[in-house]
Amino acid sequence: MKSITIFCGSSFGSENIYKEQATLLGQTLAKNNIQLVYGGANVGLMGAVADGALKSGGKVIGVLPYFLQSKEIAHQQLTELILVETMHERKTKMNELCDGVIVLPGGYGTLEEFFEMITWAQLGLHQKPIGILNIDGFYDDLINLVQNMVDKGFLKQINRDMLLISNNTDELLEMMRNYKAPSVGKWISKDKT
């Protein structure tokens, strides 16, 4: 993997460990010569992961809609800042630039980005690994919800297994390196679950 997109919060959250782990992730990507692609902001976990990578000599590409740049949140020290018109163009560009995705703690926007990318993978639109860095159990309830989708017949287990989860950066990167996308289709029937 040469390039990973990170989706995460534009806030720091209530626990210091979120910022610490975001910074560590940025540092780890740089040390592994993996380019960071992210939302382009200098605030919250977004800024922390970018700063971690940049301070460790990494390459960082930000993708930011024009309307957010006007709010003066664009990171000024990036390797490259790509400006786009819409949020959808942002996700599309971030997908084009990466070999995989890691999700850190965040809010609605982070979840929306994560679910679109995992849905694209489920539909076979890409075969990239999607990982959750489950810092301090932040995503435990979401992981339980996804398992409930399987248990209730709305999601195949093989599609659940597409989601790579760890609370350890190095372990998650290793899981992503070894990822093989499933070859079965999305559709669930009573005969084939």
Image (cartoon, rainbow, N blue to C red):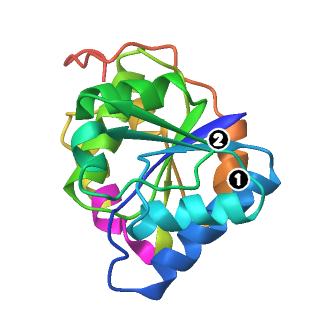
Residue 68 visible in the current orientation: yes
Q: On the image, which quarter does residue 4 sit in?
A: top right
Q: Element type at marker 1? A: helix
Q: Is residue 155 above or below residue 74?
A: above
Q: Element type at marker 2? A: helix
**What residue do we see at 35% from left, 57% from top?**
143
Give the position of the C terminus as an image quadrant.
top left
Front-most of 110 and 193?
110
Part of the protein shown in magenta: 136-143
Q: Residue 124: x percent and y percent?
A: 42, 15
**Marks 1 and 2, the one that precedes in the sequence:** 1
Q: In this figure, which residue is indicated by the disc labeled 1?
A: 29
Q: Is residue 11 left or right of residue 4?
A: left
Q: Residue 175: x percent and y percent?
A: 67, 46
**What residue do we see at 20% from left, 55% from top?**
108
Residue 141's disc number? none
Q: Is residue 30 left or right of residue 99?
A: right
**What residue do we see at 25% from left, 49% from top?**
70
Look at label 2 and name its amino acid.
Met
* Main SS of residues in magenta: helix
Mark 1 → mark 2, Cα distance in angstroms: 13 Å
Q: On the image, which quarter does residue 49 sit in?
A: bottom right
Query: Can you tell which of label 1 and label 2 is closer to the viewer?
Result: 1
Look at label 1 and name its amino acid.
Leu
Q: Is residue 138 above or below residue 35?
A: below
Give the position of the N terminus as an image quadrant.
top right
Residue 176's disc number? 2
**What residue do we see at 50% from left, 22% from top?**
96
Q: Residue 53: x percent and y percent?
A: 67, 58
